[in-house]
Image (cartoon, rainbow, N blue to C red):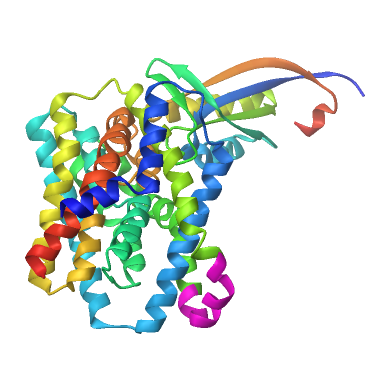
Amino acid sequence: MTPTTRKKLEIIIEAPLLGRVEALLGASGARGWSVFASLAGHSSHGDWRSDGLSDAQDKRLVIAVVSDAAAQAALEALTGFFQDYPGVVYVSDVTVLRGEKF
Amino acid sequence: MFDLAAQNLLSPAILFFALGLAAGLLRSDLSVPETAAKTLSLYLMLAIGFKGGVEAARAGLSADFATAAAAGVILSLAIPVIAFYALKTISTLDRPTAAATAAHYGSVSVVTFAAGSDFLRASGVDFGGYMVAVVALMETPAILVALMLAQGGTAKRQGMQGALLREVALNGSVVLLIGAFAIGAITGERGMQRLDLFVNPLFQGVLTLFLLDMGLVAARRLREARALTAPLVAFGLLMPLVSCACAVGISLALGVRQEDAAMLAILAASASYIAVPAAMRIALPQADPGVYLTLSLGITFPFNLTIGIPLYQAVTAMLLG
């Protein structure tokens, strides 16, 4: 198997918006992603912590490894999304095996 | 009335809430694991819903239910309007934050309902089991009213109402509450015989542990509150009284049973902190959750739990009795 370069998107968003971001990733051509729960953190708005009551301010980390074209499409869609909603996205190059799966 | 208030303040559940609040404010490392808190919350919804369903089946469908339901929906439509204009008058909150906060006060708190049920039953106030269904009916209308109040700068979100209704109507706690109510109504006494040990003797203990966690969460909210001003704190303490007055007025006008009116006043005075915050993050992301969550959880919930519930019961008994 030949190592191949792909784009890794790491998207941090508020929990209630997860469904929208997943839909956006799917429409951008991402073939898979994983979602991770949050514990606590700090931002320009102060500290936040998951409290088990309301997930209004809980965060979710979505990680997707995608092709260059899908990454470009997802970033364009996320640019519009982040005009309305809080969140961040990081993009990096990663080396994967079985590149055809991404 | 003072006896009732003292009795409420010195009950184990309220004292454990105070313990959680004190521990949180003193930055103790006491904590309830998040998954445990979620499980306790699920238990409370199941027990409240199921018991309400069994009681509703026992009593049968009645005009009293229809009257209480109509009163609940009217309150949920009217309270956000009052809350919104009160906030715009006494504070400098922007329109979206005032509207989102108004939605919280128009909707209801299921944990306040649980604590209120416990208090009313202990005081011999026999409100109808169908009040569980009234809780569910009061969850959503306030959100729609708040969105209308917020409109002006958010026209592109007007098409979101379907998605938002779905978000609130299918919120886990609402689904479990109504589902358990339906199961209780279907299985009736036979179902209660099977679940009696689970939903009755354990209830107080679980509520107590949950309120300990609520105390910790409320304290954390208060510690991290940066947006609260004196007028907003006054709003968090006075708005429940205004809502209680509205509940009493509508109960008198529609002829709601006194026992149901006591619970209706508790519901009207409560502010949501589970279903509505998530809906507001979707619908009004520019609204500041530091305001509405802190007011609802850090100010109004402790007030209702300690002073409000016995006060609302005494007021309804005096004016409708």
**Between A87 and B125, which is closer to the camera in this rendering?**
B125
Instruction: Examine the residues drawn in magenta and state their main secondary structure.
Output: helix
User: Could you tell me if residue B96 is visible in this image?
Assistant: yes
* Direction from residue B228 to residue B202 in the image, left or right: right
Please say whether residue B30 is one of the residues in the magenta stretch: no
**Between A24 and B149, which is closer to the camera in this rendering?**
B149
Taking the view exactly as shown, the residue that stands out farthest to the right is A1
Image position, residue B165 (x, y; %): 37, 54
Q: Quadrant of residue B285?
A: top left
User: Could you tell me if residue A54 is visible in this image?
Assistant: no
Image position, residue B94 (x, y; %): 19, 29
**Between B276 and B181, which is closer to the camera in this rendering?**
B181
> In which quadrant will I find the N terminus of chain B?
bottom left
Image position, residue B27 (x, y; %): 43, 21
Residue at the image position 64 percent from the left and 35 percent from the top: A29
* Region rendered in magenta: B184-197
